[in-house]
Image (spheres, rainbow, N blue to C red):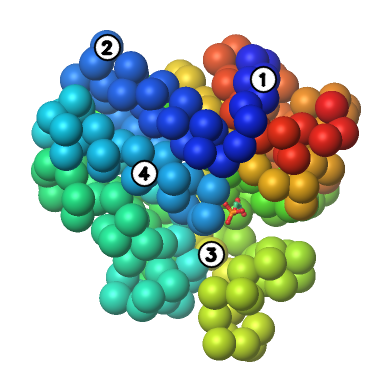
Amino acid sequence: MNVVTVRNYHQLSVQAAQLVADQIVQKKNTVLGLATGQTPIGMYQELINMFNKSEIDFSKITTFNLDEYYGLSSKHPQSYHYYMWNNFLKHINIKKENIHLLNGVTENIKEECNQYENLIQKNGGIDLQILGIGDNGHLGFNEPAIGLNSKTHLVNLSEATIRANSQYFNNIQEVPKQAITMGIGTIMKAKKIILLANGRKKAHAIERTIKGPVSTEVPATVLQLHQDVTIIIDQKAATHL
Ligand code: PGA
């Protein structure tokens, strides 16, 4: 794994955006895997800035999002659908039909998951997957567990994740208890992966991801087995390295 430690969150966002831009220059019809959460917001902002300066063209790219809360419709302000539109997609020239987000209110989970996997395949697989990391080492919503599901699936969120994400809801009861997420296998099939982490609260998960033994108890450790991973972290997230 290629670990890049930068000074601060701004630098992290700039560097991540540059890697995405380089990828799109290299392959105009890049298939991007996208993440939500606080961490990539600065990167999305940088990409929007590049687009506004005509430095990048998103018209041929395709995107697949990592995950979605189960039970939240696309109009719910805490849905990842809503997040993606507001923080990135509505600001760029991506074609609507090239955007893929999981349907959190699907009536047929199995079909939703299978269809998503098939669509990723049909588009030639993910060229570049952006990832954040949970304080508990989760990737997407692949939570620490005895075993990890490899394909897109429905998952029960861990107590830690529900607690961490309750800051975005009125109270902890409102946080969905389940989500649909790409599986670890889906993520590992991406040709390139960029994982972003900033702040001291991620330092422990980052230490285990880079130095720890590969274990399903820290899902991000599986990235040690991928051949093209770049981890961009700020100095605080690098505290224990
Ligand atoms: P964050 O979430 O970017 O909001 O810290 C990351 C995650 O939980 O995967």
User: Circle 3 sits on which residue?
Assistant: 179
Q: Does any atom of ligand 1 lie closer than 8 Å to the CB of label 4? A: no
Identify which amino acid the numbered label 1 is placed on.
Val
- Residue 161 sits in quarter: bottom right
- Looking at the image, residue 193 sits to the left or right of residue 172; the answer is left
Provide the residue designation for mark 2: 26
Q: Which residue is mark 4?
A: 44
Quadrant in which the N terminus appears: top right
Q: Position of residue 2 (x, y in %)?
A: 64, 15
67 on left or right of 147: left
User: Which amino acid type is shown beneath numbered disc 3?
Assistant: Ala
How many numbered badges does the structure rendering display?
A: 4
Spatial separation of the CA atoms under disc 2 and disc 3:
34 Å
**CB under 8 Å between callouts 2 and 4?**
no
- The picture places residue 228, in percent across and down from the top left corner, at 56, 15
Where is mark 1, residue-wise?
A: 3
Q: Is residue 25 visible?
A: yes
Q: Select label 2 or label 3 by which is in front.
A: 2
Q: Which one is nearer the viewer's eye here, 150 or 98?
A: 98
Q: Nearer the viewer, residue 100 or 49?
A: 49
Quarter of the image that includes the C terminus: top right
Q: Few, some or many C-alpha atoms within 10 Å of disc 2 (few <14, some 14-19, many ≥20)?
A: few
Please report whichever mark, 4 or 1, sits nearer to the chain's N-terminal start. Answer: 1
Cα separation, mark 4 vs mark 3, equals 23 Å
39 relative to 50, above or below: below
